[in-house]
Amino acid sequence: MPRFLLINLNNTSTKLALADAAALLKRKVVPTKSLSVSAARQAVKGWSFEGVVLASVVPKKARIFQTLFRNRLLEVTPELNLGVGIDFPEPGGIGADRLCNAVGVVSRYGSPAIVVDFGTAVTFDIISKNRAYIGGVIAPGLGVMTDYLYQRTALLPKINLEEPPDVIGKSTRGAMLAGAVYGYRGLVRQIVTEIVARLEGKASIVATGSYASLIAAKLPELQIVDPDLTLEGLRIICLNNLPQ
């Protein structure tokens, strides 16, 4: 059975997976800031694959894979056979990772659906009951917010995100954790509520990305946490567009 290399290249991390027609087989993560030709070669060392599919939102780093795999690289764009429709005024403005999320969620959970992706930004992607991508919401990411507080204030520390001990912080760190985690749960709940009210049918709501498990832990609106959703979308796009 043919195998393929899937690459989800985002601002913070680059996820690579070896896959075949049935499933994701192996996974690796490389920090995007340290990504180089040698790092990419090392990440896929020992993997055998026929084709490569890249979803990138970092053009400068994408050149690394364009150089390495130029003769067998397929890049995700709205022009490909995605298996879902696009009902959006400017399809070229949709991030490749968001297209993958739309494909992945329809494949695994059907439609209508909402994908909440906790990355450098937190994005909400909406798929109608007719299996069409119809738009989304973009907000600053959780890590971006806490890093901004650390960088722009003299007395606030840099923190690692985790569940706060209480909504009422008993220390500076506790207060920052409460603001970040409870604050983002409030943001996600309100946006999801507004989106659901505009959709026809019962929507599947799926969280993915770095902080999905943390935020979803006490947020019933996030019904499903699927860390492989974007890669699964990439796998489906691969099957729809590369010869088997």
Image: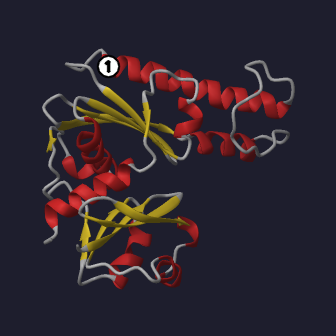
Front residue of this view, candidates 217 and 55: 217
Front residue of this view, candidates 216 and 198: 216
Q: Picture coordinates of residue 200 (x, y %)?
A: 19, 19
Residue at the extreme top of the image, as rendered: 197
Which amino acid type is shown beneath numbered disc 1? Val
Figure quadrant of residue 206: top left
| Quadrant assignment for the C terminus | bottom left
Q: How is the image coloured?
A: secondary structure
Position of residue 115 relative to residue 54, above or below, is above
| Quadrant assignment for the N terminus | bottom left
Query: Residue, x 19% and y 62% (percent of image)?
Result: 239
Q: Picture coordinates of residue 143 (x, y %)?
A: 61, 44
Q: Is residue 58 left or right of residue 150?
A: left
Residue, disc 1: 196
Q: Picture coordinates of residue 139 (x, y %)?
A: 47, 36
Position of residue 184 relative to residue 33, above or below, is above
Q: Is residue 95 left or right of residue 167?
A: left
Figure quadrant of residue 211: top right
- Identify the secondary structure beneath mark 1: helix
Query: Residue, x 60% and y 45% (percent of image)?
Result: 144
Query: Residue, x 36% and y 51% (percent of image)?
Result: 230
Position of residue 8 relative to residue 37, above or below, is above
For disc 1, the neighbor class at 10 Å (few under 14, some 14 to 19, many from 20) is: some
Count of marks, rendered view: 1
Q: Picture coordinates of residue 131 (x, y %)?
A: 16, 36
Query: Residue, x 44% and y 71% (percent of image)?
Result: 61
